[in-house]
Every structure is written in structure tokens, then in C-alpha cells.
Image: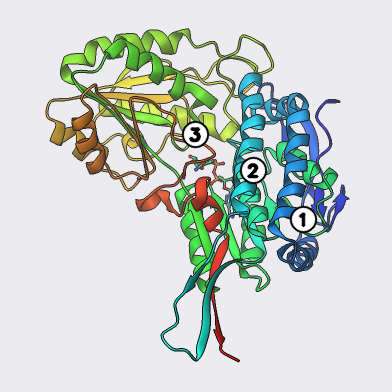
Amino acid sequence: MSDYPTPALYIDGDWIAVASGGSRPVINPADGATLAVLPLASEAELARAVAAAQRGFAIWRATPAHERHERISRATRLLRERADSIARIMTLEQGKPLAESRREVLLSADIIDFLAEEGKRAYGRLVPPRTNAVFAQAVTRVPVGPAALFTPWNFPLNLPARKVGAALAAGCSAILKPAEETPGSAVELVRAFHDAGLPAGVLNLVCGDPAQVSSYLIAHPGIRKVSFTGSIPVGKHLGELCARGVKRYTAELGGHAPVLVLPDADAAHVARLSVTAKYRNAGQVCASPTRFLVHRSLFESFVASFAAGAQAVRVGNGLNADTEMGPLAHYRRIGEMESLVEDAVACGANLACGGRRLPGAGFFFAPTLLTNVPQTARILQQEPFGPMAVVNPWDTLEEAIEQANGLPYGLAAYLFTRDLSLAHRVSADLEAGMVGINHFGVSQPETPFGGIKESGHGSESGQEGLAAYLDTKLTSFGSA
Ligand code: NAD
């Protein structure tokens, strides 16, 4: 298709259209058509990328933070200028509605700008010496080194922006491996940095066989930092690989966010907010609200409002102006959704709406609501990562909190009540890296985003996002 550019790898400042690891098609999830052919790296390109990142690191760490900020800002200006064309690329490869894609481009520019500003404030401190023989003890924050960055397909620009923005702001060089399903948006991010005059080698992009790329890069002594966003099993595996080389590791893994709706909440209002949050990006969001735990007194009205809202969601090609929910990102997700619904119903759950693939060539699945789902159902153990919500009733707050905390996940949790002192108490008991009270907006450029338990460790965005790419160094000056 003409308006989806041919994706290329980017190593040492050069675009590489043909690579030695073969190629694979990039598919439009809205119609199953091939958009382009993506070249794949083998060890030859990966070795070149690491060598380039090492040279790039030598240049970039020696570049003053103010100059780094200036160069990065040029790239974010280009991202904003190109927002419409990048949004179209994102919708073609990932499926989300065009307006969501455009917001993602602008938010990505904001994320990078925030981190670049923070890069100017990577302050250290002076520690008073114990003896006059020591003149000063300086604690400084220094870039970790070349970073390998692995991002998934659900936010094809935002997730690369968090990682690339933090790495470059801190003075690290980077090799980005975006998801092979959605390389085009990441290529546009790299193109903005290229056009902004980033020195060759500071930022590189490779695609390939994910397991081969990650095992090569993580084992390479030239890579000092690894960041991954994706599933828990892959995240654990990469963590083990990092441990072997004692590499700094940030892991943003899955979530299965509970939403506690307390008896004093406005059921219809919360259901309206919930439908918008649940079906955004077809539910393919790690902080997506999924387990709605609603006080029994509100249960019936909440379910009725939620089901009406879910059935009214306009599903279609993300390029159509009136589409509210696009297709799932790839074909495998459809089979997974069908099997989760089938299993829940077999366990005794009630299917209130959706639960089926929509006809046509694309990977569309109806907005789905399951109620009274037994704990044994797979959907209550495993993150669905799709347009599926579960609503279950509760009688006591203790029981609701126990259910909310009952999984190995601990990314986001949400709570709706007008009683702020109760909200304070309940949020303290929720085992989650992020708690949203009376709203779902827990992901902002300025605030840390990250999970506890098996949802990962470390945070992105906020000051913490930058800190993940900085080591602490002591320099002690003896009196001459
Ligand atoms: P998947 O595990 O095959 O892929 C998820 C991502 O991890 C992809 O980007 C893939 O390229 C990458 N990946 C897979 N194996 C890898 C490896 N060995 N080394 C490096 N990267 C690797 O699964 P999928 O079918 O694409 O998605 C399924 C699950 O992934 C979802 O159910 C969800 O739990 C999780 N996921 C989470 C996020 C998130 O934002 N936390 C994003 C996408 C997918």
C-alpha cells in the first residue's frame, strides 16, 4: 500500500532495506492485507548494531546534557509536524482508531520532551568528607551504557518513546527492537532523530526473530542495560538472561487490573467511564481495567449500563472517522479471545454481550462482557489483553480487596467511591504499582508507570524513567 512506507533497519546512521536474516510481511489487521515487507537482522547486523551503539555511546555520553536536550527537542518538533502521517502508519499496522494514533504521536513527543528536560537535572551531590585529607566526595549520575530496548505492538510509538527518550536523555546509546508486527511507527521515531541530526550510532533499530535478537543482544558484553515491555513469561526469561551478565533490567509486564466499585459510587457514571477505558485500543493495554468488582447493591444497574455501553461501541477500520474500536493487532489474539470466552462459559459464567469474532477479513472481536464468573475460569487467572471485561459482585470490602490482590499481577488497580478517607485506606491495601481513584488516567509523561509482583520492576516515565538509565558514581578528591 502506497502510504505505508517500506520499513528498514537503521544501523550506524544508515537505513538497511535488505538484511541477512530474511524478511516477513507486515499485515494490516483491519483487512489481513500485506502492507510491506520487513527486513530481518541476523547476527551479522546485530553485531554491527552493537559496535555502532558502543561508538555512539562514546560520542553521546561526552555531549553536554543541554546539547543533548537541544538535539532531542528537534526530533520531537519533527514528530509533532509529522503527527498526521505517522498516525496513519500506526493505524494501518496496528488497527487503533486514527484519533487514538494521533494522540499517541503527540503524547510520545511530550514523553520524550519531559525526559530530555529531566536529563538536564540529573543532579548529584557533595558529601562532607570525614577527614581534611579528602577535599570533596562527589556523587554523580552517569549513563549506564548502550541499552537494548524491546517493545510490543500495542503502543507502537509510545512504548519506544518511553525507552528511547529516557536512554537518550540520560546519555546512553540504544538499539531498539520494536515488535515485528508494528515496525513502521518505530521507524518514524528513528527517522525523526535521524533528521534532527542525532550522531550516527547513538540510536539503532533492528527487527528479527525476537528470541534470537534478545538472546544475542543481552549476552553481548557491549550492552549494559535492557528494557522490555511484554508478557510475563518472556519478561522472566529476559530477566534470567540479564542476571547472567548482571545487566540493569527494567521490565514492564502484564496486568489484570481490578476495579473496585464501592456502594456509594454512581453506577451509571462509573460504567460509562469504564466502557471507554476498557475498549480503548481494543483492550490491548497492560493497565486496562478488566476485573470489575462491584458492590452487590449496584451490581444489576452497573451490568445493565456497562452492557448497553459495550454494545454501542462502534467497531471498524481505524481509518474510518466514526470508529471507536479497531481490530485486534494480530490473528493469534482472536483464537485466544474465543478460547477464554468458551472456558468462562463452560465454568458457569454468564455472557452478557459480545464473545465472538466479527465477520470479515480483519481481526475484529466484539466488545465482550462476562458476569458472575467463577474464580476457576481462565480469564480470572490470566490477563485477557483484549476487549473483554468481567463483572462480579461482592458483599464485604475485605472480600473485594482479597480478590483484587489474589493474582500474581500488580500493575494498575482502580477504585470508585465518594468517601476519600475510605479511598485512602483501600488504596493502601491494594497491591499495585499504580492506583487510580475515581478515574483511569494513571499513565502520564510526568508520573512513574510500573508494576509490582510479577507485573515487573522499575518504572518508566517520570523522574524514575530517567533514573533507570543512570548509574551512581562516587569520585573522592584527596587534598593535593
Ligand atoms: P508474545 O509473548 O509472543 O509477544 C509479546 C511481545 O514480546 C512481542 O512484541 C514480541 O516480539 C516480544 N517477544 C516475544 N518473545 C520474545 C523474546 N524471546 N525476546 C524478546 N522479545 C520477545 O505474545 P503476543 O501474542 O504478541 O502477545 C501475547 C501477550 O503478550 C498478551 O497476552 C499480553 O499479556 C502480552 N503483552 C503485553 C504487553 C504490555 O504492554 N505489557 C504488550 C503486548 C503484549
The residue under the point 33% across, 44% down is 432
Circle on res. 41:
1
> Could you tell me which secondary element the residue under label 2 belongs to?
helix
Q: Nearer the viewer, residue 368 or 194?
A: 194
The quadrant of the image that shows the N terminus is top right
Q: Find residue 274 and report its horizontal and vertical position in percent.
A: 39, 20
Foreground label between 1 and 2: 2
Residue 436 image position (x, y, % from top left):
36, 32
**Image quarter for residue 34?**
top right
Work out how far the residue at label 1 is from the one at label 2, CA to CA, in angstroms: 27 Å
Above/below status of 335 relative to 170: above
Q: Is residue 278 left or right of residue 101?
A: left
Earlier residue among tags 3 and 1: 1
Q: Where in the figure is residue 113, as x and y percent of width and height?
A: 65, 42
Q: Amino acid at mark 1?
A: Ala
Q: Amino acid at mark 2?
A: Ile
Cα separation between marks 3 and 1: 28 Å
Kindly indicate the quadrant of the structure image that contains residue 107. Answer: top right
Amino acid identity at mark 3: Val
Task: Give the position of the C terminus as an image quadrant.
Answer: bottom right
Q: Nearer the viewer, residue 286 or 415?
A: 415
Ligand 1 has an atom within 8 Å of the beta carbon of the residue at disc 2? no
Q: Which residue is label 2 attached to?
A: 112
Does the Cβ of the disc 3 residue fall within 8 Å of ligand 1? yes
